[in-house]
Image (tube, rainbow, N blue to C red):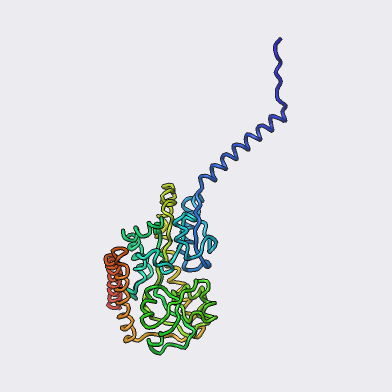
Amino acid sequence: MQQQTTKPPEKFMKLSRILIASAIGVSFLAFEVQAATEWNVSLWGKRRAFTENVEKLAELVEQKTKGDFKLNISYGGLSKSKENLDGISIGAFEMAQFCSFYHKDKNPTITVTELPFSKNVSLARIAEIYQKVHEHPVVAKDLARWNATLLMPTPLPQYNIVSKTDALSSLDDFNGLRVRGPGGIMGVLSKLGAVKTGVPFSEVRQSMDSGVIDAASFAPHAHLATKTYKVGKWATTNLNLGSANCPVVVNTDALNALSDTNREALLGSVNEAIAFYVDNYDNNTTGAYEKAVTEEGLNKVTFSSEQTTKLNELAESVRNDWVTNNADKFDSQALFDFTAALFAEESKLAMKARDGNTKTK
């Protein structure tokens, strides 16, 4: 007897088709999630002129990859600012920004750029100098200890001081002044008796209010962010002893693991991100700071040519000290000479440009 076959109920057939379609949809969704690449980026404080290079980089990378590669920026949620390099080394996150003077023993080579070299170099040129220094073999080897690759500089103008004490009348007044500032600047001021006092960036204003520090040495964006000018009585206009090197760094393994397309999008967006940062800083931040200092009525301290000469003499000794103190760690003389030559060349170009402008007029 022939066995009779029966068709499944229509309701069951519809349910089967729905389940199959759902399974296919989930498979596609899983594939898309797997294909997308997301990096965590550790910054600190709040979004400000100092972080616009990273913000722009994230925007460009997402645009160029049509959302396939995203940089998730966190302001303090991933790590403390002084531990960002440690986090990069263990792969806790893929990208971070840090300042070399926060932990000079962890990254001694790039502190060379914080030495007082020149007072007349544009932000765009500073970015170029930092990029060349970051590519130096001695520097690359130094950062490799942390499984880190220097991706992008954060060029900063000359630092100046805002203080709540009585205005300076001579360089001797630096004696005993408790200042929060980077290595090169504090190296010079320490020779005048200033006391380097370290407090976290987020606590600068509070520390000035409470008297833990007397003064802060910052680039314009940081004075604006911490509002030092709200409690300050005076501000220098031409300290010209250098600035800080606060690069953007990536975990080397994470960089190497990127697809060719995503790596090209990341590396190919660096110069554009820096250009955006420089334009924003030059056209908005510096002027805003100068306006704030004027409106708050701070006394502007401008050093005389004699005082500047004295500061430059001390700066020379600080540069020599840096070479000597790092000689047993790496070829500090070679790296110093390389960096000094870059700054000297930029100074010559700046002078040539000024001379040309003068002749044109």
Which residue extends farthest bottom?
169
Examine the image and state in which quarter residue 129 appears: bottom left
Q: Nearer the viewer, residue 250 or 318?
A: 318
**Residue 233: x, y in percent?**
49, 85
Q: Nearer the viewer, residue 279 or 46?
A: 46
Q: Nearer the viewer, residue 355 or 240?
A: 240
Q: On the picture, is 122 further left or further right than 228?
A: left
Examine the image and state in which quarter residue 123 appears: bottom left
State the residue at coordinates (45%, 77%): 197
**Residue 290: x, y in percent?**
46, 79
Rendered view: 159 above or below 88:
below
State the residue at coordinates (38%, 89%): 170
**Residue 279: x, y in percent?**
43, 68
Rendered view: 7 above or below 325:
above
Q: Nearer the viewer, residue 159 or 177?
A: 177
Q: Quadrant of the C terminus?
A: bottom left
Rendered view: 312 above or below 13:
below
Q: Quadrant of the N terminus?
A: top right
Q: On the picture, is 298 further left or further right than 11?
A: left
Numbered-mark total: 0
Examine the image and state in which quarter residue 3 appears: top right
**Residue 229: x, y in percent?**
50, 80
State the residue at coordinates (43%, 47%): 259
Rendered view: 137 above or below 348:
above
